[in-house]
Image: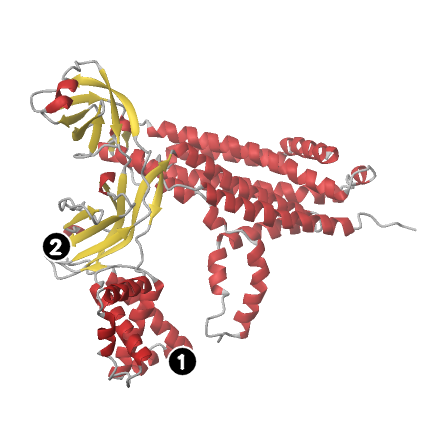
């Protein structure tokens, strides 16, 4: 171990002295200094910070990755080329210890530079957070709310629950059995099943399945099983009308006459049309989504606020508080004042107007607060539904406005009213709501009603529920650890390649590795053999050749944290641990094991006679 640490310290010092590493450090410093002034985004403060976080982390990782490749590939290969390896080889130091020391030293150097870059990005983002003006003018309260609740946050994202068709059918059958109506229902299908009772029970099950699907036509569930059922229905309708063959023949020119590929293209088109229709809300119609496993307990925010205007006879009291705290309130939203229930009436840049019931002990207790006094305010965790809405016919509404209303409930207690949806389309829209709408079982039902006076439907996409689960600082730490895992892997690969090929070849191999890692998911899909097994020889060869590459190649597009930071999405410790095990322990470990095996058998010099 002493030999490994000696080589590691020597490697770290060597990296510090390298002109190549110094050049990348200078480029990184220039990028982080210039980026804040160049990142304007959409002109808003939230857009500027989003652009900076995205490009800042991306450029930092790009520069550090390139530096890791070039420096790592040169460490061993240059030692062999300049014959400096002989000063190490004659010492009582195993070749494995030499390589491990080189790798650990390079990783330590990367960690130092990554830490400096991450601290610089965080400090700059915090400075931008305090800006008062943007190119569009003074920062509005709505823009400030986006910054505080959608960027400097760590929110859990929950997709709508899919339909569990099998469970619904079993539940319906159990209800019929409990009411002693099941046997009677099966008897009605005996004639159609030629007195075969198991077949009659199967026909009843299918009828129940059809009725459930018909009742859920307005549900936009994306369950694959449900989609396949609707595709099968559409194919059966085409076959009955005699239009199936014609539809397939329409795709033949695009598949060079391959009927199987033409059928696959037709099925994909049908599945796309069905998914679009099931996400469309016609005028006068309502669509429901169900969310479950919502856990918002223990996320309340507490802060001391100063009284500006004491409570009046209407129960209104004005407070002054930090904008970062005030922006988490919305009009009508609940807030506790000294432990008593209240609600927000008006919010601006300077202060917040709150309302307390004009009777009872709450009003009497808060009446004792004079101007300048402090009171503890408690804000419940923010719950948001985000979605993207587009018109089925863009020309149907003038100025791209959509008029709709929404409703939410826990499915047990009465739902709240139908507030108006924000008048926006083509972009993600957040709706803030009280967490009290979530049931004790962690469930929430959310509905959107289309009351637009048009003949076109409205498409709702990317709908999700989000709520705070952690702080931005902890989330940023996990994002930094994800970037560190990538650098550890690249360090191992660069040392591996540099141990058995020359420096230029090692650099070319490692640089080629990065785009493959970024496009790993696409390449996996492209090289996949269809379920039917019918594929060309080239596809089959690519599939089997890509299997070992896919196993050793990390998915950089999945582990790059820029998108999560930009949207304030929580990066879980479980995901960080999974990435560390897969990329550091397994993939980097395999790379270093190969490096040791190859370098152990490599002949460093030939004996000349």
Residue 350 is tagged as: none
N-terminal-most mark, 1 or 2: 1
> Which residue occupies the foreground of this view, 578 or 166?
166
- Circle 1/circle 2 CB separation < 8 Å: no
Which residue is at the front of the view, 537 or 582? 582
Q: Secondary structure at mark 2?
A: loop
Image position, residue 159 (x, y; %): 32, 51
Is 218 situated above or below 48? Answer: below
Q: What is the crowding at mark 1: few (fewer than 14 residues within 10 Å), some, or many (at least 20)?
A: some
Element under disc 1: helix
Residue 122 is left or right of residue 593, and the answer is: left
User: x, y percentage for residue 325?
Assistant: 28, 28
**Residue displayed at 38% across by 33% down:** 471
How far apart are labels 1 and 2 at the CA level? Answer: 43 Å
What residue is drawn where x is 71% and y is 36%? 4
Whether 481 is drawn above or below 222: the answer is above
* Residue where numbered disc 1 is placed: 259
Where does residue 50 sit, x and y in percent of width and height?
36, 39
> Residue farthest to the left?
313
Give the residue at mark 2.
Answer: 452
The image position of residue 149, as x and y in percent, is: 30, 36
Query: Residue placed farthest to the right in the image?
Result: 609
Up the image or down, 589 lies above or below 255; here it is above
Left or right: residue 327 versus residue 283 is: right
Which residue is at a point 82% across and 37% down the rendered structure image? 91
The quarter of the displayed image where residue 312 is located: top left
Residue in front for this viewpoint, 534 or 44: 534
Apparent side of residue 602 relative to residue 566 in the rendered image (left or right):
right
């Amino acid at each position: 171990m002493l030999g490994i640490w000696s080589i590691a310290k020597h490697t770290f010092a060597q990296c510090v002295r390298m002109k190549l590493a110094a050049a990348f450090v200078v480029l990184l410093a220039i990028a982080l200094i210039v980026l804040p002034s160049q990142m304007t985004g959409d002109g808003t403060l939230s857009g500027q910070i989003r652009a900076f976080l995205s490009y800042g982390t991306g450029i930092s990782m790009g520069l550090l990755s390139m530096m890791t490749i070039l420096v790592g590939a040169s460490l061993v290969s240059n030692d062999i080329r300049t014959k400096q390896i002989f000063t190490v080889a004659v010492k009582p130091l195993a070749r494995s210890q030499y390589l491990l020391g080189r790798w650990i030293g390079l990783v330590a150097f990367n960690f130092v530079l990554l830490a400096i870059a991450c601290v610089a990005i965080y400090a700059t983002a915090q400075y931008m957070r305090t800006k008062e003006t943007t190119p569009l003018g003074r920062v509005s309260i709505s823009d400030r709310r986006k910054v505080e609740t959608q960027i400097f946050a760590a929110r859990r994202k929950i997709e709508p629950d899919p339909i569990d068709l099998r469970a619904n059918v079993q539940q319906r059958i159990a209800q019929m059995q409990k009411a002693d109506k099941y046997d009677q229902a099966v008897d009605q299908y005996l004639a159609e099943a030629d007195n075969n009772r198991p077949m009659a029970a199967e026909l009843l099950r299918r009828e129940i399945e059809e009725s459930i699907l018909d009742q859920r036509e307005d549900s936009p569930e994306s369950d694959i099983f449900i989609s396949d059922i609707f595709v099968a229905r559409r194919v059966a309708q085409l076959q009955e009308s005699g239009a199936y063959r014609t539809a397939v023949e329409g795709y033949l020119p695009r598949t060079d006459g391959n009927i199987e590929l033409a059928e696959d293209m037709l099925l994909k088109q049908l599945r796309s049309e069905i998914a679009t229709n099931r996400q469309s809300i016609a005028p006068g119609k309502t669509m429901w989504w169900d969310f479950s496993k919502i856990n918002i307990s223990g996320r309340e925010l507490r802060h001391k606020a100063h009284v500006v205007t004491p409570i009046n006879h209407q129960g209104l009291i004005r407070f002054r508080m930090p904008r970062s705290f005030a922006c988490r309130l919305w009009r009508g939203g609940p807030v506790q004042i000294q432990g008593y229930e209240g609600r927000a009436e008006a919010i601006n840049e300077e202060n917040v107007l709150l309302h307390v019931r004009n009777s009872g002990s709450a009003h009497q207790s808060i009446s004792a607060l004079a101007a300048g006094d402090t009171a503890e305010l408690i804000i419940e965790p923010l719950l948001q539904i985000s979605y993207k809405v587009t018109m089925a016919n863009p020309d149907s509404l003038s100025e791209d406005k959509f008029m709709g209303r929404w409703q939410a409930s826990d499915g047990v207690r009465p739902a709240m009213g139908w507030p108006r949806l924000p008048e926006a389309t083509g972009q993600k829209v957040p709706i803030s709501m009280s967490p009290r709408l979530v049931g004790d079982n962690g469930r929430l039902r959310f509905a959107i009603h289309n009351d637009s006076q048009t003949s076109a439907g409205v498409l709702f996409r990317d709908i999700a529920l989000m709520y705070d689960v952690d702080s931005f600082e902890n989330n940023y730490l996990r994002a930094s650890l994800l970037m560190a895992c990538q650098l550890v892997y690249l360090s191992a690969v660069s040392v591996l390649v540099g141990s058995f090929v020359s420096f230029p070849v090692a650099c070319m191999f490692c640089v080629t590795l990065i785009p493959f890692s970024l496009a790993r998911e696409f390449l996996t899909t492209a090289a996949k053999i269809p379920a039917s097994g019918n594929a060309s020889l080239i596809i089959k060869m690519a599939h089997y050749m890509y299997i070992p590459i896919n196993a050793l190649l990390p998915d950089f597009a999945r582990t790059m944290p820029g998108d999560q930071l930009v949207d304030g999405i929580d990066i879980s410790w479980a995901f960080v641990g999974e990435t560390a095990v897969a990329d550091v322990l397994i993939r980097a470990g395999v790379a270093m094991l190969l490096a040791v095996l190859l370098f152990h058998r490599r002949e460093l010099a030939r004996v000349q006679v």
